[in-house]
Image: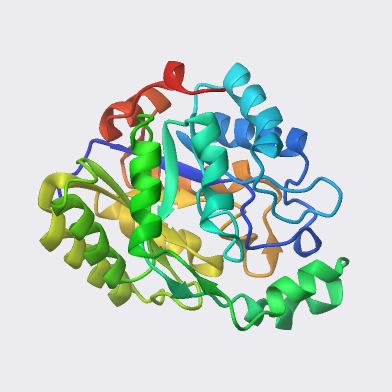
Amino acid sequence: MATTRKTIITCAVTGAIHTPSMSPHLPVTAEEIADAAIGASEAGAAIVHLHARDPQDGRPDQTPEAFKPFLQIIKQRSPCIVNITTGGAPTMSIEERIRPAETWQPEVASLNMGTMNFGLFPMLNRFDAKLEHEWEREYLGNKNIVFRNTFGDVEHILTTLGALGTRFEFECYDSSHLYNLKYFLDAGFVKPPLFIQTVFGLMGGIGAHPEDVMHMKRTADRLFGDQYRWSVLGAGKNQLPIAAISASMGGHVRVGLEDSLWAGPGKLAESNAQQVGMVRQIIEGLGLEIASPDEAREILSLKGADQVAF
């Protein structure tokens, strides 16, 4: 993999994995999501990865209308790159999941590269007594979630959004997902540079041991050579240790309250900006520099903020 001079920080602001009862700091309303994204950008994140939520009870909301208010505020107040989810929540259909990105045509959209079991239920051991909404308990306790991302689903997202100039954060939860992406590259559905987000520590995907990180890195190097840009996502307590591994090897990093609620053992992060600040300290402590939004646009060959539909 060809390394780049600057490290791109992505901040995943709210997501669909954690629920509002788990942390009072998780942004839920459009205003909270916008403020959190702008704060993360000001702290050093070049990219903000966005989901939407129902402002009443915090459940994931994948209607384009739910995204509109915070997308417009972020664009007005920040130069950051907006990355809209096509993952939504693993219980949603592919038609639901693609609608916000198809409507708003962002510079980047996330794309999960394979079907997998998706287990959130271990979180109940820590949070069950705190859950205020019945949907939270049902959602987290579901042991039968299959996060569907078939070859047909992935092709549909690639062709639909690719025609709009949107590029992708390819989320790879296991080595098979890298091979799936290799198929789409060879078949001409995607073109380099590929922005590959290797995901560690979510139940149903690869683990979070350093050897797991190195296995994914070696596999990606062999399959893609200098055609990709490597980033990492460590779930929960693994967020900063795995980010440190990537940064030390010339890769990029993703943090944020979607992926981890924590700022240390037993200590809830008070904001996305706090987590961005913590990983920035690691990056700069290694003698590296963070990428600005415009530098990240150049590294990833993005279309530019003037080409989005919000």
Residue found 20% across the figure and 41% down from its top: 191
In the image, taking residue 71 as reference, residue 94 lies left or right, namely left
The mark tally for this picture is 0
Q: Is residue 45 visible?
A: no
Depth check, front residue: 233 or 139: 139
In the image, taking residue 122 as reference, residue 165 lies left or right, namely left
Depth check, front residue: 138 or 257: 138
Q: Is residue 22 visible?
A: yes
Place of residue 98 in the rendered image (x, y in percent of width and height, measured from the top left): 51, 46
Question: Which quadrant holds residue 224?
Answer: bottom left
Question: Which quadrant holds residue 304?
Answer: top left
In the image, taking residue 25 as reference, residue 274 lies left or right, namely left
Q: Is residue 43 above or below residue 171?
A: above
Place of residue 137 in the rendered image (x, y in percent of width and height, measured from the top left): 78, 74
Residue found 26% across the figure and 63% down from its top: 180
Residue found 13% across the figure and 53% down from its top: 186
In the image, taking residue 186 as reference, residue 90 lies left or right, namely right
Place of residue 2 in the rendered image (x, y in percent of width and height, measured from the top left): 14, 45
Depth check, front residue: 171 or 27: 171
Q: Is residue 305 above or below residue 23?
A: above
Place of residue 111 in the rendered image (x, y in percent of width and height, measured from the top left): 41, 52
Color theme of the render: rainbow
Depth check, front residue: 74 or 64: 64
In the picture, which quadrant includes the C terminus?
top right
Residue found 67% across the figure and 45% down from its top: 52
